[in-house]
Amino acid sequence: MKKIKILSLSLGVVFAGLFAYANLRQLSIAEKLKTVDLASYRLKGMMTPAERSALEQKISALPGVTACSVNKEGRVASVLFHRKEINETQLASHLSNKGQWQVAQKTLQTSGGCPVHGMTASFYAFISVLDLRN
Amino acid sequence: MKTNKILFACLMAIAIAFATSCNDDNNVSTIEPTLYTRLGGIDVISKVTDKFLTNVVADDMINSRFEATVGNHYRLQVLRNNLIDQICAGTGGPCQYKGQTMLEAHTGMKISAAEFSALMGDLAAALDFCEVAEREKNDLLTILTPMESDIVDK
């Protein structure tokens, strides 16, 4: 019973420490920016370079979108956005340009990627959940 | 005689003050603003970084290297923050890059010269899209290009 009390107390202290760190740490300039999400889409249909450029400009100008790129072949579009302002379904609708192109969201790989960010991202995720400033 | 000495000392003090202030003015006018300032600060750097990320994810040649990272909300923030901090710090801005060195980060990934070239092309396209002037664009690419030796074939 005493061991359980000590263990509970220790876990409480660790959690309180992490909570304090999450909320009191000094945020870098980049960390103060609003968080973003990324969605990638496959496009079907003929697209001229001018249409590709116009579509990029149109999507980039939407409220909540920070950047949009369509590849040279007009087959893949990727969009960075603020989830609180716009979602994937709305983006797909805008990308289709009233049915001019068929749009399907790509499922991104879940493993691999930049190994450098693997461990720090897990810690960052935990701290971000505790950070009430987010 | 004493009055002359005091007058002379006052004139010298005024002359020195003038000379010093003139020197300061000259220095201010010749100090070159940092590349960070010339680029437009954190707003432009974050815009360029976001456009660079979407370019990379739309680029069939290299997107498989990044998909798993950008597809995860938290890993995406870490990557984006590191890129912004790296460009900001490298151009003389008030940021500190906290990520791993390029050599540590890319060892074992066996990135080819063609992939690195495609990545730099995506960055150049992002700078063009954000209408960064040619001089600032070249200055930034000059800072980043030497990283190739720590990234390619490791």
Image (spheres, rainbow, N blue to C red):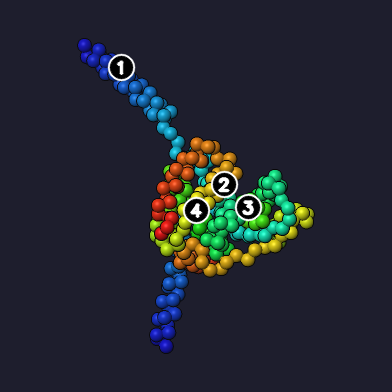
- In three-dimensional space, the C-alpha distance between marks 3 and 1, rounded to whole angstroms, equals 71 Å
Report the amino acid beneath label 2.
Answer: Ala
- In three-dimensional space, the C-alpha distance between marks 2 and 1, rounded to whole angstroms, equals 58 Å
The reply to whether label 2 and label 1 mark residues of one chain is yes
Residue at screen point 44% across, 39% down: B34
- Quadrant the C terminus of chain A occupies: bottom right
Report the amino acid beneath label 3.
Answer: Asn
Which tag, 1 or 4, sits closer to the chain's start?
1
Give the residue at the far bottom of this rendering.
Answer: A1
Which of the numbered marks, if any, corresponds to residue B11?
Answer: 1
- Quadrant the N terminus of chain A occupies: bottom left
Disc 4 secondary structure class: helix
The reply to whether label 3 and label 1 mark residues of one chain is no
Residue B57 in sight from this viewpoint: no
Residue at screen point 50% across, 55% down: B115
Report the amino acid beneath label 1.
Answer: Leu
Residue at screen point 57% across, 47% down: B126
- In three-dimensional space, the C-alpha distance between marks 1 and 4, rounded to whole angstroms, equals 69 Å
Judge depth for marks 3 and 1 and give the one in front.
3
Which of the numbered marks, if any, corresponds to residue B114?
Answer: 4
